[in-house]
Amino acid sequence: MMAEADDRLVRALAKTAQGDRQAFASLYQQSSQAIFGMCLHLLRDKDEASDVLQETYIQVWHHAGEYHADRGSVMTWMMSIGRYRCLDALRRRRCDVQVDTVIHEPPSEDSGPMENAHDQVDRQRLSDCLKGLDERYRSSIEMAYFRGFTHQELAVAMGQPLGTTKSWIRRGLDVLRRCLGS
Amino acid sequence: MKPDDYERNHALAAEYVVGTLQGMARQRFERWMMHSARLRRQVWYWERRLQPFNESLPEASPPRGAWQAIEQRLFADSTTRVSAAGWWQSLAAWRWSTGIAMLAVFALLIWTPSPTVVTRYVGVVQSPQAEPLWVVNASADHRLMVKSLPQVQPAAAGRDYELWLLPESGAPVSLTVLPTGDTQLQIQLTDQQVRELLQSRSLAISLEPAGGSPTGQPTGPVVYQTRLIQM
């Protein structure tokens, strides 16, 4: 099923790269809910998420021909584009956000959205590797990834010195890479 | 890239994808990625590996207008549905080229104290790395507000930043010594200053002795400049 969906996306993207607007519409139809869901989760603001979604697809239209398999699946490629746009939006917003609103963001006590992951191989591998991680490392990585927290915000949220959370992230990612392999 | 940098770059690539690589370091990294295929592959590694994070998030239906807006922005020329999109299209294009307008609109939306019909002008003073430092908000009722963003570092000991109005002709006019840190101040402009500001819309910031220039004219280097945009 997944392979079929991936194939459909690859075909739609290839045609999009040739300027086929129908294929582009089909690409949007197949992928926009996942991308919008991700943006909404990161930005917590429907209007801003919609804006980022639009920017994402505009970039997809202009750069469709640059996709290749080394980037991962078509969804990986498109969601990465969307994710960086979300991070940019968070950064712009951060300039004016009161620090208090960040401080009161509770550290994630549940196990994070990964618990909802299905048993797909990639997911399973990441999930297994995260389980093996020191709790502090895992929480830091998840808070940064799912909330877009900066090092500074992580330090505030976790009540730790900046150097400590920086090193948790660094060590956590290092351990994760060794577990995930190439 | 030196071979012994491989591990360090992997760590940077990971933090780039996770999002904790920020500010100047992030921009440096993005420039560096353009030159290094290996670095790009390291980033792709992390994008692929962490994609299950993205897939684990709940999907959500985008607003109905989103697709129409995308079509409008991409294909407005070739469709008949152009109607009132003209000015917005040009604004959007300009926004992409400068990155400032969005920021200005955003700053205006969340910072402007009260919505009024008074014409407003907004300028964002940015670092060379495009990091916003000060937001300047001027209105035709003579008020000039300057908000210093948290990332503004104080000037060196014994120095202050000073804001200057650059008239179309004539010498710079001192407006205020600028705050640093997460603060804002408001000053009242004279009639002449408002006129000159509306004509030139140009501001500059110089580095001066503490308390501001002793001569009434810039004595130190001009470190930043910005232009006001009418909102």
Image (cartoon, grey):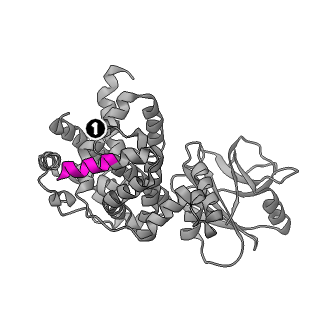
In which chain is the residue bearing label 1? B
- Does the rendering let one see residue B96? yes
Depth check: give the residue in front, A23 or A6: A23
Q: Quadrant of residue B59?
A: bottom left
Q: Main secondary structure of the magenta part?
A: helix
Judge from the rendering whether residue A64 lies leftward or rightward of residue B8; answer left or right. Answer: right
Depth check: give the residue in front, A39 or B214: A39
Residue shown at 60% from the left, 57% from the top? B77
Rendered position, A69 above or below B165: above
Report crowding for label 1: few under 14, some 14 to 19, many 20 or more residues within 10 A (C-alpha): many
Q: Quadrant of residue B40?
A: top left
Query: Which x, y percent locates residue A181?
Result: 17, 35
User: What residue is pinned by disc 1?
Assistant: B45
Residue shown at 13% from the left, 46% from the top? A121
Report helix, strand or loop for mark 1: helix
Judge from the rendering whether residue A91 lies leftward or rightward of residue B38; answer left or right. Answer: right
Query: Which x, y percent locates residue A9?
Result: 30, 50
Q: Amino acid at mark 1?
A: Tyr
- Quadrant where the C terminus of chain A is found in the figure: top left
